[in-house]
Image (spheres, rainbow, N blue to C red):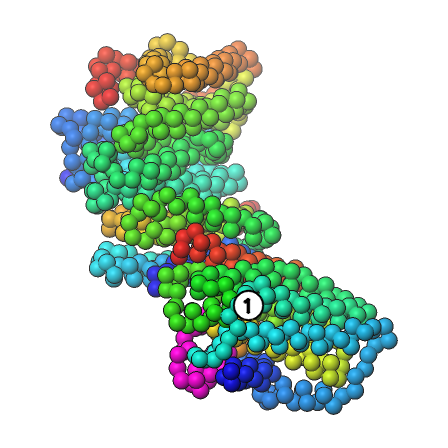
């Protein structure tokens, strides 16, 4: 079950890399978070770890539901560009993505020997970190960059869940808080942009 | 209790930002002076002192850093009073600026005092996000672009730090459990960490994240462009407070890393900082405006502090850190005056200051400019002397004498390039160009005077003694 | 032996039905009155009565190609993993052979398109070559990865192994292979995001463009080949990625297997209704995803063992 979820996690992230439409990208992000939340719930139930179940639930609510919805609303309100073509041409991406995966899998190999339990998950979370970085790099528009940042957060959450068997509750809550603050700041930045544009139009 | 006392001034500032009277601004310097009270209590209390369980623990190092940062905070809030006379900013934007400045303060107090890697990270992230908005208070297209730039790159850097923290936590969790998040517990059990490779991997990633955040290689021009595009107090806050918090984290992480494997730590940091200074020296040589010049020089000094710290000159690093934290905000704030109303050219920038305030301003800026290139009475002169001395000592005791000496020599050559450039700029400011009448306000001169007093205090024997006791 | 032959016969018989089901489902989902499920058989019967007309420029190839298109596929039909326990199966045929046989069929299809010397045949053939060149490596990789997980390079044996012990340890790479294979199923059979089998619009068609110039019995054979190809892919998907119910009594198991084939048809119909056809030069994006997932499946299995 955990293997399946982690597979879905990586698969949605890779599909997001090839997506050229904003709403589709948000959907993949949402699915990505969904698998992450379910993963945390599964591991939390197996280990009888209440903290992890709580953070899994928050992930489901916040990252799979609220954040994609808010981003979609924001993009509608501020008229963001919805056609987001990656800068990296597809034929290079086809070569680059597997190269990154092979590289990170081998990079993570010595690490995964040292982590008890779910050794493979560490490798997958490190590679998804790199893929999220690639997602940020391959776009010029703001919205996919934000999604890339959020995916990076997801990858780190996965690493925290799998490599350490769950971070302390306080840290997890702090990270969620910062994520919310990031959304607020993004909202403010976009609102200012709109205000300025309308101001210029009025003047 | 103590936490509440520490956070109270920032909270007052936050609340005051919602008041719709211009007079509310007067509260700012008062509340930022008020933070000196809890910081003073910190100094009087026996160390280490757990302010909030194991999460926030005050010791000599972070009380010192907090003191320096609070003094910088006072100076910056003083200078903020006259921000609207030098640049075009609306009343609403000013209030927003204060609001996010307060959030920034809260985040930084948390991360400076943190003994817990998670708290440290949360504070840093909070400060980073609030800075994004402070950059955006400048309503220009460049500032808008740079705010997003900062958001994205800052987020990547911060995520790298978190990545490193998770790996470090994973490496020590088998022996420490949840305590693996605490710096002091990590340090105490550093020898027993079951997988040093994992720890070092985490340390390297966290360090790269922190270095990128301070504008080290490969992000050298990133920070300079951001500081150019935003209003000058933002740059002052960056160099005076935000970088303090980052470097405190670096101090903590590297202390643990030294206990794990000293040779790896020294090799990694020396190579990284040398590379950074190598690039920055030439960028400084080509810099054509004050903001970029000072910002690049800030990167150089942060690299030097990191280098001294791992090179064994902890005292030198702390002294250099203090001097830089006072000098750089002072220079950035005076840049606001030098470039008042959007005029910026280097030639003749120091001409045309009349009256007592003008003369005082002229004197202080010259002093700071010459102090930043470590001319003798400056604390930087002493810190570099001690720092390079410590590095040579370290070289003698290591197995790589020639490499270390070579690195030090290369560093000195690069520093002399920077020195040459700064002196040339100073001369150009003083002797070339035409004089133009420029206004200077009391608040700014007061801010600069505070920084000057701070600098002088650093070279008193008592302060030096205190710094040595930390090291 | 009899079960083996029975399975092949059933697959061959339901081949036109499956395509008919997809068409009917699509019409139903689009609120049209669905056409009869037996339309596929009627078309074949009608075509068998028609006269063979050949263009003047056509050479011997047009007369031979239809048989050479169908025959490799028929051979593949005999190499598929068994649908029921106790049936015979060919255990030693691996990913390369299967892909190669199907590529042979595609090759003659392209020759047929070129041979009529019409410009439609030419564009159809070049587009088919373009798609096939991208799809085949992914196909080899995917089947290879699944056979590795099953512990035997022979596809038939791999199907049996998967049915007897499901690779729970390798769920992640298994999932990647499944995604890749489903994309290939759509691409190789010319379904909607890649090719629209229902239009005769020169901008979009691929498969139809190649067979525009033939008629009568030959067209019937080529159409049957298309149906057989879909059955091959559907049953490969069913036995490699939905390997349950293999051990039931044989009538039940066979019924379940056919049910899975209809399930695949339903999935394809849903995809067809919900997506728009890609521009030809966007097709590599989709196939690129398939290649990435196929490769990912292999390396995840090899390096991580997950």
Q: Is residue C160 above or below residue B142?
A: below
| Residue at mark 1: chain | C
Question: In the shown orientation, is residue B270 left or right of residue B428?
Answer: left
Identify the magenta region: C241-263
Q: Is residue A62 above or below residue C17?
A: above
Q: Which quarter of the rendering shows the C terminus of chain B?
A: top left
> Residue B341 location, x and y as percent?
50, 28
Which of the 4 image quarters holds residue A69?
Answer: bottom left
Secondary element under disc 1, as helix, strand or loop, is: loop
Question: In the shown orientation, is residue B83 left or right of residue B64?
Answer: right
Q: Name the residue rendered at 48%, 33% in the picture.
A: B218
Q: Which quarter of the rendering shows the N terminus of chain B?
A: top left
Q: Name the residue rendered at 63%, 68% in the picture.
A: C101
- Check disc 1 and report the residue beneath it: C93
What main secondary structure does the magenta stretch of the protein show?
helix
Question: In the shown orientation, is residue A91 left or right of residue B65?
Answer: right
Q: Name the residue rendered at 43%, 26% in the picture.
A: B271
- Which of these two is toward me, B414 or C49? C49
Q: Residue furthest left?
A: B46
Residue B423 lies within the magenta run = no
Q: Is residue A35 above or below residue B86?
A: below
Residue C248 lies within the magenta run = yes
Q: Residue furthest right?
A: C56
């Amino acid at each position: 079950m955990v293997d399946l979820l982690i597979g879905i996690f990586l698969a949605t992230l890779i599909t997001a890399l090839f997506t050229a439409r904003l709403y589709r990208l948000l959907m993949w992000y949402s699915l990505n978070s969904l698998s992450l939340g379910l993963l945390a719930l599964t591991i939390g139930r197996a280990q009888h770890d209440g903290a992890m179940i709580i953070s899994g639930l928050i992930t489901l609510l916040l990252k799979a539901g609220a954040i994609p919805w808010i981003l979609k609303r924001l993009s509608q309100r501020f008229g963001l560009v919805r056609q987001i073509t990656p800068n990296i041409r597809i034929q290079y991406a086809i070569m680059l993505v597997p190269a990154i995966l092979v590289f990170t899998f081998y990079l993570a190999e010595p690490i995964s020997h040292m982590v008890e339990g779910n050794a493979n998950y560490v490798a997958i979370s490190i590679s998804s970190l790199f893929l999220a970085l690639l997602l940020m790099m391959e776009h010029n528009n703001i919205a996919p960059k934000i999604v890339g940042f959020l995916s990076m957060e997801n990858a780190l959450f996965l690493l925290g869940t799998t490599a350490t068997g769950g971070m302390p509750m306080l840290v997890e809550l702090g990270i969620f808080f910062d994520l919310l603050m990031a959304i607020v700041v993004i909202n403010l930045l976009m609102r200012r942009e709109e205000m300025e544009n309308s101001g210029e139009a009025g003047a | 209790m103590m936490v509440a006392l520490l956070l109270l001034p920032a909270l007052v500032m936050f609340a005051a930002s919602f008041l719709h009277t211009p007079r509310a601004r007067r509260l700012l310097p008062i509340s930022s002076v008020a933070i000196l009270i809890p910081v003073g209590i910190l100094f009087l209390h026996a160390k280490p002192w757990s302010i909030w369980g194991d999460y926030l623990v005050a010791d000599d190092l972070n009380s010192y850093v907090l003191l320096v940062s609070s003094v910088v905070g006072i100076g910056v809030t003083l200078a903020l009073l006259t921000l609207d006379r030098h640049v075009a900013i609306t009343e609403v934007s000013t209030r927003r600026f204060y609001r996010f400045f307060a959030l920034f303060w809260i985040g930084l107090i948390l991360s400076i005092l943190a003994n817990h890697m998670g708290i440290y990270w949360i504070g840093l992230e909070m400060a980073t996000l609030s800075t994004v908005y402070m950059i955006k208070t400048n309503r220009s297209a460049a500032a808008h672009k740079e705010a997003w730039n900062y958001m994205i790159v800052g987020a990547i850097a911060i995520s790298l730090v978190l990545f490193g923290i998770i790996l470090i936590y994973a490496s020590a969790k088998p022996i420490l459990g949840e305590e693996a998040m605490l710096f002091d517990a990590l340090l105490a059990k550093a020898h027993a960490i079951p997988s040093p490779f994992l720890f070092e991997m985490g340390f390297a990633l966290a360090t790269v994240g922190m270095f990128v955040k301070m504008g080290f290689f490969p992000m050298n021009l990133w920070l300079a462009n951001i500081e150019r595009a935003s209003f000058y107090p933002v740059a002052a806050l960056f160099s005076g407070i935000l970088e303090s918090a980052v470097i405190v984290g670096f101090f903590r992480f590297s202390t643990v890393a030294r206990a794990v494997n000293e040779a790896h730590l020294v090799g990694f940091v020396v190579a990284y900082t040398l590379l950074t200074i190598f690039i920055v020296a030439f960028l400084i040589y080509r810099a054509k405006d004050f903001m970029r010049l000072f910002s690049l020089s800030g990167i150089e000094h942060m690299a030097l502090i990191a280098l001294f710290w791992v090179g064994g000159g902890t005292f030198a690093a702390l002294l250099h850190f203090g001097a830089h934290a006072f000098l750089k905000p002072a220079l950035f704030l005076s840049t606001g005056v030098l470039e008042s109303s959007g005029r910026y050219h280097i030639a003749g920038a120091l001409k045309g200051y009349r009256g007592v305030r003008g003369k005082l301003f002229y004197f202080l800026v010259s002093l700071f400019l010459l102090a930043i290139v470590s001319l003798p009475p400056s604390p930087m002169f002493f810190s570099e002397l001690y720092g390079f001395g410590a590095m040579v000592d370290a070289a003698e005791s290591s197995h790589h004498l020639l490499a270390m000496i070579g690195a030090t020599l290369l560093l000195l050559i690069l520093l002399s390039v920077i020195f040459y450039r700064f002196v040339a700029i100073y001369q150009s400011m003083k002797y070339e160009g035409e004089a133009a009448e420029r206004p200077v306000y009391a608040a700014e001169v007061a801010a600069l005077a505070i920084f000057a007093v701070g600098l002088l205090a650093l070279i008193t024997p008592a302060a030096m003694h205190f710094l040595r006791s930390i090291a | 032996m009899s079960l083996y032959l029975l399975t092949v016969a059933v697959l061959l018989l339901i081949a036109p039905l499956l395509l008919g089901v997809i068409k009917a489902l699509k019409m139903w989902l689009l609120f049209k009155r669905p056409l009869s499920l037996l339309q596929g058989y009627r078309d074949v019967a009608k075509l068998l009565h028609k006269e063979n007309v050949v263009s003047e420029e056509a050479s011997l190839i047009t007369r031979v190609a239809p048989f050479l298109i169908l025959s490799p596929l028929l051979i593949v039909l005999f190499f598929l993993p068994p649908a029921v326990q106790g049936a015979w199966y060919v255990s030693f045929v691996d990913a390369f052979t299967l892909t190669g046989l199907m590529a042979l069929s595609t090759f003659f299809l392209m020759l047929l398109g070129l041979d009529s010397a019409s410009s439609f045949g030419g564009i159809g053939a070049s587009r088919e070559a373009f798609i096939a060149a991208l799809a085949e490596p992914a196909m080899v990789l995917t089947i290879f990865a699944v056979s590795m997980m099953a512990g035997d390079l022979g596809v038939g044996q791999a199907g049996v192994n998967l049915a007897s012990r499901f690779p729970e340890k390798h769920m992640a790479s298994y999932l990647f292979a499944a995604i890749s294979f489903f994309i290939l199923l759509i691409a190789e059979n010319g379904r909607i995001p890649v090719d629209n089998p229902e239009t005769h619009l020169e901008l979009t068609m691929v498969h139809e463009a190649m067979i525009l110039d033939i008629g009568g019995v030959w067209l019937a054979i080529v159409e049957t080949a298309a149906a057989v190809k879909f059955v091959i892919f559907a049953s490969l998907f069913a036995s490699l990625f939905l390997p349950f119910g293999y051990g039931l009594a044989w009538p039940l198991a066979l019924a379940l297997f056919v049910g899975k084939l209809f399930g695949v048809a339903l999935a394809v119909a849903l995809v067809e209704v919900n997506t728009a056809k890609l521009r030809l030069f966007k097709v590599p994006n989709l196939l690129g995803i398939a290649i990435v997932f196929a490769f990912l499946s292999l390396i995840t299995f090899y390096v991580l063992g997950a």
